[in-house]
Image (cartoon, rainbow, N blue to C red):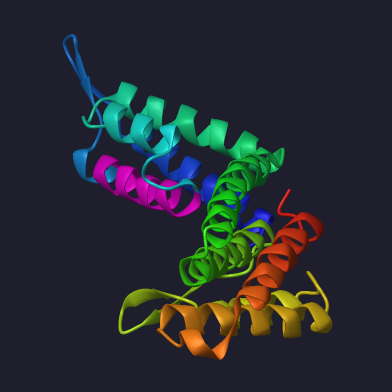
Amino acid sequence: MKINDLILRVDQLIAMGQLVLDTRRRDGYAEWVDSGEMVGFRSASLSFIERVYGAEQSHYKEYANTTTGAHPDDAERGLAILRAIKSEISGGWLFTVKGLVASELFADFIGMAEHLLASGYKDPAAVIVGGVLEEHLRQLCLNNTIKIEEQKNEKLIPLKADRLNSELVKASIYSKLDQKMVTAWLDLRNKAAHGKYDEYNENQVQQLVQSVTEFIARVSIH
């Protein structure tokens, strides 16, 4: 989904919220909105926020906690959060923040892999670095609005790393030469993950750590 598509979806949700407010009714001092319309608006908004930010992010939690009723204030709070989200996406802040957080996490895991390798544990080091690489591919896809899931049997299934690698090259995020190197790195990770420890050596894992670190720095997500 492209940034313009994200903004369009936010605008659609904001329009839903406005329709909810149009159902406002008053009985004496009490005010309410149509509960069915409010539930639909809340559900659609939470689904969108979770897909974009994740369920642990503050926007999701704030929306979930402050729109539990069927009162005009609930709809207005939901609309305020959606407008803030639209501002973030339009300004590019969404992907910048994700990139910074991911970079810090990657550095921690790379450091862990280097420590394991220095201690003679090449196999877990290879698995960790391979995991960092796969997550970097996933973040690159998100940053460049390339899908990371596909629908199968009414379920969203994550795309495998090789498929992400291919899609990133198709989108010209990096070169075909990079694609070949990423494929080789993923292959080494898979060997480590499946216990084929005699099919690679410590020097190859050292090269893997160095190469993946350089690749992440060169093909950045922010």
Above or below: residue 44 compared with residue 134: above
Judge by depth and name the residue closer to the eye, 8 or 192.
192
On whether residue 174 falls in the magenta region, the answer is no
Q: Is residue 160 left or right of residue 60?
A: right
Q: Residue drawn 71% across and 59% down?
A: 213
> For the image shown, how many numbered marks are present on the structure?
0
The front one of 181 and 100 is 181
Q: Magenta region: which residues?
A: 38-52
Indicate the quadrant where residue 164 lies: bottom right
Q: What type of secondary structure mainly makes up the magenta span?
A: helix
Q: In the rendered view, tell whether residue 167 sits above or below residue 102.
A: below
- Report whether 65 appears left or right of 88: left
The reply, left or right, for residue 161 in relation to residue 79 is right
Percent from the top left, x then y, of residue 21?
37, 31
Question: What residue is drawn where x is 30% and y is 26%?
Answer: 66
The answer to whether residue 118 is visible is yes
What's the residue at 34%, 45% (across, down)? 41
Q: Position of residue 104 (x, y in %)?
A: 61, 42
Residue 50, how many percent across, how many down? 40, 49
Where's the N terminus, which quadrant? Answer: bottom right
Nearer the observer, 179 or 211 = 211
Residue 206 position (above or below residue 6): below
